[in-house]
Amino acid sequence: MPPDPPEPTEPRAPEQPDPTGWQRLDPRMLLVHPVREVIRFLPVLIGLFVAGTASGGTDYWQYLGVLVPISIGLLRYLTTRYRFTPERVELARGLLDRHVLSTPLDRVRTVDVTASPIHRLLGLATVRIGTGTASDDSDERLDLDGLPAERARGLRAGLLHQAATRTGTEDAGPPAEEREVLRFDPGWARYGPLTSSGAVVTAGLLGGGAQLASELGAFEHLDDRDWSLGIPLWTGVALGAALVLVGVVVLSVAGYLVTNWNFRLSHAPGSWHVSRGLLTTRDTSIDDDRLAGVSVGEPLGLRLAGAARLSAIVTGLGSAGTRSVLAPPAPRDEVTRAAGQVLGTDAPARGALADHGPAAARRRYTRALGPAVAVLAAVVVVVAAAGWSRWLLVLPVAGVALCVVLAADRARSLGHALVDGYVVARSGSLNRRREALEVEHVIGWTFRSSWFQRRAGLTTLVATTAGGRQAVAILDVPEADAEELARRALPELTTGFERRR
């Protein structure tokens, strides 16, 4: 007689920390917190040493100042506790000023797992639980800074699994295998110089270097030195500009690679996962139920190179929601393909948009050319009155021509649509953005119009939501089109609405 088949076992959720009581962070954080505090107090410590040396003192009392940040770091570890209950996650920290943060598991929006170089060296990670608060205060963030890396990754999966189960968006059971949507290509680093990060870093380094040189007295005797390089002045200026440009490019590419190395976007039932980073790694998980839409950003430099970047609109995360990166600067086709995968349809990211008409285009030209023409007229008057060279008019005339091109591009960028359950809005030129917001996440409509818009028969239709910047705005749309779009999307929100004429 054949043996009885084994009884099926119920699937288990990912392993969770012991919820029976308060727990400490990993003891290895005793090596991290004191170092952090010493770095934070470094300017004060340097001041103490400089003051002691300048006074001619030979005592070692100033070395005792190092004990203060070290003690603060030790107390930070000793006074931090966390625990998980079947209903909530709680974090308590502080000695004199005690903070206790508590949130229900079903309010978990995102879970970030970050590991700095020192964390990776020690096998640790930081878990940041996004709970829907719009506060930017670090004391109000629910961060578990100092968990074993494996436990942190398991906790990320478990928290989102429990949140989805409790809200009814996922059946109880282990998460299924992830489906990869987008993976990093080192060739994308060519788009690094087309973003502003490299220029900002270069400017910061140049400013810091100049300040340090000034403190060391490098600029005190400039008149006493022979700075002639044996080349014409303009050649030296051109070489200096070329060196700065090379520095911007190198730093931009390096920054892009450090930030986005090994980027990966994937999806498992219930949540989206993003991982990236070379020195500091970051894993982010976004609950499906909280992802309200996407934003395709096309700054002018990326747009001219045929590239774009993608971010998520996540409900309940305040302005930080738009910072949930789903794709770094990458080829536009890759970005739009990823957007289609995230939304479940390609139409919002690729489909044609309705034009806003000639009145909206005229407003783009008026707003761009008005200040430029006024400046040009002022320069013409000053040049004529002073009898200066007419070559001085070249720059303002070129500025007016540039404003014409900018206005034309802004007019072409305007557009909107209601397709496959998404409200789509596009606007901008220097930083063009195409946003797709799921109709289910629209909680209200706002019709906003200035006196000039009313004269032109235009309005700005704002779809209010709890995600990202709290709204998606369709700029300068004809009033009739705005009302029709609002009624088609959510008729119940426009019942009894009558357009004011």
Image (spheres, rainbow, N blue to C red):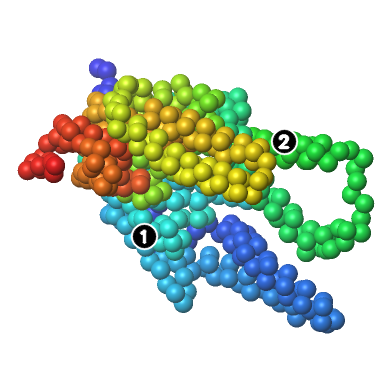
Under circle 1, the secondary element is strand
Residue 46 badge = none
Residue situated in front as seen by the camera: 409 or 424: 409
Residue furthest top in the image: 1
According to the picture, the residue beneath numbered tag 1 turns out to be: 90
Q: Where is residue 232 in the image (x, y as percent from the top left)?
A: 86, 38
Q: Nearer the viewer, mark 1 or mark 2?
A: 2
Q: Is residue 204 visible?
A: yes
User: The residue under label 2 is which amino acid type?
Assistant: Val
Q: Quadrant of residue 314?
A: top left
Q: Position of residue 384 (x, y in %)?
A: 60, 45
Is residue 315 depicted above or below 99 in this figure? above
Residue 246 badge = 2
Q: Residue at x 54, y 70 (%)?
A: 75
Q: Quadrant of residue 460?
A: top left
Q: Disc 1 and disc 2: Cα gap in Å?
A: 49 Å
The tag earlier along the polypeptide, 1 or 2, is 1
Q: Residue at x 43, y 58 (%)?
A: 136
User: The residue under label 1 is which amino acid type?
Assistant: Glu
Q: Which residue is drawn at 74% across and 54% down?
A: 209
Q: Position of residue 202 (x, y in %)?
A: 67, 45
Quadrant (top left, top right, bottom left, bottom right) of the C terminus = top left
Q: Is residue 250 left or right of residue 145?
A: right
